[in-house]
Amino acid sequence: MPAATRIALISDVHGNLTALEAVLADIDARGITTIFNLGDYVGKGPRGREVVDLCRERCEVNLLGNWDDFVPDPDRDFDSPALQWWLAQLGPGQGEWLRSLPFSHDFLLSGRRVRLFHASEETVHRRVRYVRTQDEFEALFTNTPATGFDSPEPDMVGYGDTHDPFYECQLQGRTAFNTGAVGNCMGDPTPLYCILEGVLGSADPAPWAISYVRVPYDVEAELAAARDLGVPKYDGYELELRHGIYRGMLDEWRSGEPLTGYHEREAVRA
């Protein structure tokens, strides 16, 4: 049997360079040399430029995220000082590179047809949470104009965007999983990535596995960098990095109100 390959899947770094460096160090320590990135390099955190540079250097596959699409979009019909700050932080040509990234990536692994994308099968701007309908689950495995129609529909789908990891397998072996987030995971804020293991490029059935890795890092150093650089919406960034609570719930956090209904009330652009 051919040797198995281990692929590290990272997503949603969001300008958190300290967390990314810690995760990459852990990947290196495990001897993993293949890294796929499922998008959202920029926004929220202060060092999108450095994150883009490092991911271009280290990741074999880089996919488009929602923040990567709308922050550098010259035609977007909304704006704010925060968006202008994150845009200005990008280096020359980085905005164009981000918006040119592919939507999805298909490959064979141990006889499984795997498809990776950022948020959903239709668009980077619509997310599918683990609290979802059966129709939403089944739709993840369909071909769409965004994924293209040239490849067979997948057996396995992996995505990020929600910052909440999960794994689910249903009848006929269809498997969906979420990678969680490197830059600001919700719930447990410790950076998280996936390892996907199997015989890469093989149509023949063989053992395969998915595992999750939490990587502690120096959150105080990241928050210090955010303050020094003047990142916008710092209080929300701190809430997410320290406590794993979405920044849209900052007022409730400050007031001491019960933090309920996160998944229903979270804003569109997490």
Image (cartoon, grey):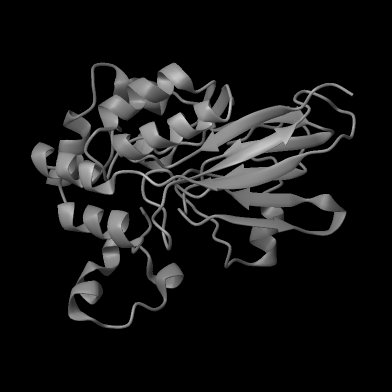
> In the image, what residue occupies the spot 42% across and 76% down?
261
Q: Is residue 207 above or below residue 254?
A: above
Residue 265 percent location from the top left of the image? 38, 70
> In the image, what residue occupies the spot 87% across and 34% down?
206
> In the image, what residue occupies the spot 32% across and 82% down?
258
Q: Quadrant of the C terminus?
A: bottom left
Q: Nearer the viewer, residue 73 or 77?
A: 73
Residue 123 percent location from the top left of the image? 51, 44
Q: Nearer the viewer, residue 50 or 216?
A: 216
Q: Quadrant of the N terminus?
A: top right
Residue 13 percent location from the top left of the image? 38, 39
> In the image, what residue occupies the spot 27% across and 26% down?
49
Q: How many marks?
A: 0
Residue 69 visible? The answer is no
Left or right, 49 with reference to 230 = right
Residue 6 percent location from the top left of the image? 66, 30
Q: Quadrant of residue 189?
A: bottom left
Q: Nearer the viewer, residue 151 or 112?
A: 112
Q: Is residue 101 above or below residue 270?
A: above
Q: Is residue 53 above or below residue 113?
A: above
Most distant residue in the front direction: 29
Residue 37 visible? The answer is yes
Q: Quadrant of residue 154?
A: top right
Left or right, 159 with reference to 91 = right
Left or right, 25 with reference to 70 = right
